[in-house]
Image (cartoon, grey):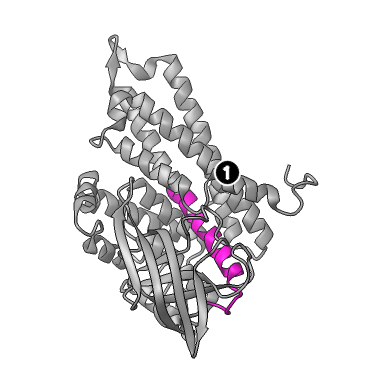
Amino acid sequence: MDFSFKEEQLQFSDALKRWVVKDYSFEARKKIIGSDSGVSDAAWAALSELGMLALPMPQEQGGFDGSALDMFLVMQELGRGLVVEPYFATVLGAEFLKLGGGHAGLLEQVAGGTLKLACALGEKQSRHDLSDIAASATPNGAGYVINGRKSVVAHGGQAHSLIVSARSGGAQRDTNGISLFVMPATSAGVTVSDYRTLDGQRAADIVFDQVQVPAAALVGAAGAGWNVLDAAADYGAGLLCAEALGAMEAIFAATLEYLKTRNQFGAPIGKFQALQHRMADMYIHLEQARSMALLAAVKLGGADALERRRAVSAAKFRVGQALRFIGQQAVQLHGGMGVTDELPAAHYFKRLTMIELSMGDSDHHLGRFIAQPGFAQGENA
């Protein structure tokens, strides 16, 4: 299996890296986080101009047909730059539309940078089980009436349209009977409560009260949305693994530089063997996480759903272990400065913590991996 990147992939990555260095510095990011909206229209326009929004879109809708491996490099640089724009939420929403079919016009808008999406999937009782859906979709004439609540919707307050999971049949935790919808965030009956999360990004709790949507709002077939939901969630988890890798690389490099410049007892503390051992352990975690995240990106492009689930859950678990270890060690090696807002290390650690809790935490994905067919017979040993 060839894990080397093509020249055009590296060019995309380098262009994004240069933009982050030039226009999305640590201080510029702090100002964006402190603004009323928590995001930057100028940054969004720049991402669109760089082709980042068109990258994963189909060619028929003005995109570049970018693969999950192409997106791996993009998310890695966004993680390295601690970018707080609603890019992940939008491309994840677009993945739902691509998998479900029938919404070419919306995909064209995403590719052109004029449409932001958010995915209203989680509920307060569901934790990481996306099939645990209490929100309802009741047939009503030519459409459906949506009722329910969704919690911690990433960039839900900044989205123009929402991807919503609701139950049109079956019991609350059944995979059958799940329907997916796309609707304007300003639809009558939709109430969005926007707030800042601990990592400086934005999320929202959203209430749907007698929200009327047409049948054309369906993403995929009515009552048969689980396969789309499962595949899109894996896509999102894979992208987050890549983002975490970029953040881990950055916090590792910052910690190494700090050990070289911080003097104690007349010498840089990086000369102390005990600290060198800790940095070596961090590096091992980083490289193992890189391997698993790359494998997940490759498997996301395959047709085998079982292999995809195994690879993504294995990656999310291993990346979760790595980000916790690397983040904690980085903070400790920085000393008291490691928890202050003045230093990027604290911001990286906060973002890594939120990634661990997004799209399924380590415990969830470990359990999911174990539950896959063949595990009990030792096929995955």
* Point 43% across, 64% down: residue: 149
- 237 part of magenta stretch: yes
Q: Is residue 189 visible?
A: yes
In the image, what residue type sits under mark 1?
A: Asp
Direction right: furthest residue: 377
Magenta stretch? 219-243
Q: Position of residue 307 (x, y in %)?
A: 67, 57
Residue denoted by label 1: 363
Count the labels in the image: 1
Name the one closer to the observer, 249 or 305. 305
Query: Compared to 50, does 25 lie above or below?
Result: above
Q: Position of residue 241 (x, y in %)?
A: 49, 49
* Point 31% across, 75% down: residue: 186
For mark 1, give the secondary structure: helix
Name the one closer to the observer, 197 or 294. 197
* Point 40% across, 62% down: residue: 89
Mark 1 nearby-residue class (10 Å; few <14, some 14–19, many ≥20): some
Q: Is residue 363 left or right of residue 51?
A: right
Q: Position of residue 179 (x, y in %)?
A: 55, 74
The secondary structure that most of the magenta stretch takes on is helix
Query: Compared to 368, does 53 lie above or below?
Result: below
Query: Compared to 224, does 80 lie above or below?
Result: above
Name the one closer to the observer, 333 or 154. 154
Q: Is residue 341 left or right of residue 376?
A: left
Q: Is residue 292 visible?
A: no
Name the one closer to the observer, 168 or 91. 168
Q: Is residue 110 left or right of residue 280?
A: left
